[in-house]
Image: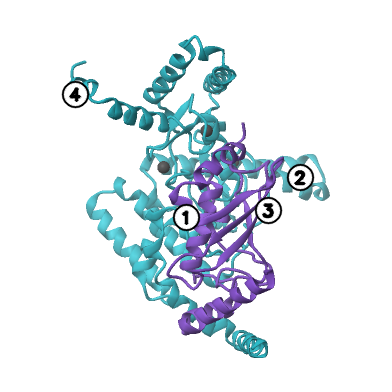
Amino acid sequence: MNGHLHTVIPKKSNADHLRIVGRVLDSTVCTICHDYMFVPVMTSCGHNYCYECLNNWLNNNRSNVSELTCPQCRNVITNEPSLNVALQQIVDLMLDIAAEDPQKSNSSEVRSLLTQRECSVAEYKSDLLEETLFNSVFKNTAKAIIDDDDDGIARCSNCQWEVEGPVCPNCNATIRNYNAGAQNFDEVDVDEYSDGELEEVERDLDNYRAESARTVHDLEAEEGDESLSSEMDQAWPTRRPRNFMHGEEEEEEEEDRGSIDSFIVDEEEEEEEEEEEQELKDERKFRRASVALSDDDDNESRDSDFYEHNDDGYASGDSLDESTSNDELEPHTIRLTHSQDNNNNNNNNSARKKRLIVLDSDE
Amino acid sequence: MSRIVKEYMGLQKRLQTPEFSWISFLAPVDDDDLSEWVCRFQGPSESPFEGFELGLNITIDLEKYPISGGPRVLFEPRTVAHPNVKWDTGEICLDLLKDAWTPIYTLLDVVGAIRDLLADPGLDSPLDLDIAQIYDADYEAYVQIVRYRLEEARLARV
Ligand SMILES: [Zn+2]
Ligand SMILES: [Zn+2]
Ligand SMILES: [Zn+2]
């Protein structure tokens, strides 16, 4: 190799070389465990973590009723992160050089790092061979299909089990159209499907209906009506999607934000004219639902997922993540006045009086 | 070696740097148990908290930290009047400590975020509606209440 940097950099001063080494060393440290990344994996947003750390985070994150997100930038991770070979080679080289040094190679620190590397690599290789990388969260995916002929119950497109959250409780599939902000499912309508996908889903649903009918038929033939109902419950769960924990008032707004989000995600796939048409449609829908709540449409569509999660009593007041914070907070000041006028006026006044009295008596 | 041990080992050195000169104290209550910490730090300048020292009690679930959850952090009870702090308990309402937690945050990040919150309250969903309303309607009155309360707490401690 003989690029310009290959010529210039080696001739630089010691101080520059140290700066480079320092920077490179820092980039080999995982921001989750603060250890060296012996198996660095990179997300689609370009952030690196130990395979083990990211795997733990994603699988923990997943059970928490939310989308899979990058710990550093909170981008939603939809594709399986891949091994960052270049970074791994750098980490390997560093450790190999440290281990070569006759004095240091005996040190317990180096030995412990060598063991650590062995374990990390072994774990990754084993998951890779068994095709269970990241506990298969990126392989096993499905969509929730809400069928009006079926009482509007949301079902996993993979196994037809009733789903409520981001993971199918039966087949463990990640539900792709789960909307963490609204804690609901984005509607799967014809527009959002490619032709092949739509056919597949319809075939699945047809099969499912046929199978259910057969199950009922078989059960009726085999057993009396009384045991039927309990068997049915197992074969065909009848629970309806739960009423999501937050009050109805806010739900409308959140849901609509959701549909706009899903539109944004899909927009690249659409033809341009279709895109405009869809945009108008979505916008109308959105305006209709949000009139009652807020007049600053602008704010709604800019709101990041991050803040949508924040609808149950947490201040959005602060975050270390500059990119998602401050400018989105301004409009909330206005809302405070709204909500207090509506709900808390009496409470507040009496509470305030009480406090003022307390203050007086203190003085 | 666990993450919290790594943080603990590098901590006192980092506290010496100018970046963290506003933290007067951050350490475990007992060096053999990294689940209970205390912190004292200077209120942010150009805020009503300027010139006062604030105390935090921090609890870390060593099983869960940092992957499945951040530390639990409380102000010393009945010291901080702030829209996002429960007066009686010192409970802090900060997204970073709840839904917005990710394992890249460290104890120092958390303390920094709490300090920033003092200067810049989130009025979206206040814990203390009362103070939030005063903050919104009459900022000068808010400043007076905050400083009066802090002064009171300081005198009580002496
Ligand atoms: Zn790691
Ligand atoms: Zn990222
Ligand atoms: Zn399923």
Query: Share a chain, discs 1 and 2?
Result: yes
Tag 3 secondary structure = loop
Gap between marks 2 and 4 measured at Cα: 76 Å
Labels 4, 1: front one: 4
N-term-proximal mark, 2 vs 4:
4
Query: Is the CB atom of the residue marked by disc 4 within 8 angstroms of ligand 2's nearest atom?
Result: no
Report the image quarter containing ligand 2. top left
Report the front residue among A292 and A238.
A292
Chain letter, disc 3 residue: A
Query: Share a chain, discs 2 and 4?
Result: yes
| Residue A143 screen position, x and y as percent | 50, 45
Query: Share a chain, discs 3 and 2?
Result: yes
Instruction: Kindly identify which residue carries mark 3.
Output: A238
**Residue at 47%, 43% in the rendered image:** A201
Q: Amino acid at mark 3?
A: Thr
Rendering colour (chain A): cyan
Instruction: Kindly identify which residue carries mark 1.
Output: A186
Q: Quadrant location of the N terminus of chain A?
A: top left
Gap between marks 1 and 2 measured at Cα: 31 Å
The answer to whether B158 is drawn above or below residue A234 in the figure is: below
Gap between marks 1 and 3 measured at Cα: 21 Å
N-term-proximal mark, 1 vs 2:
1
Labels 3, 4: front one: 4
Q: Is residue A81 left or right of residue B103?
A: left
Report the front residue among A277 and A219.
A277
The mark found on residue A8 in the picture is 4
Labels 2, 4: front one: 4
N-term-proximal mark, 3 vs 2:
2
The answer to whether A95 is drawn above or below residue A31 in the figure is: above
Q: Which chain is purple?
A: B
N-term-proximal mark, 1 vs 3:
1
The mark found on residue A231 in the picture is 2
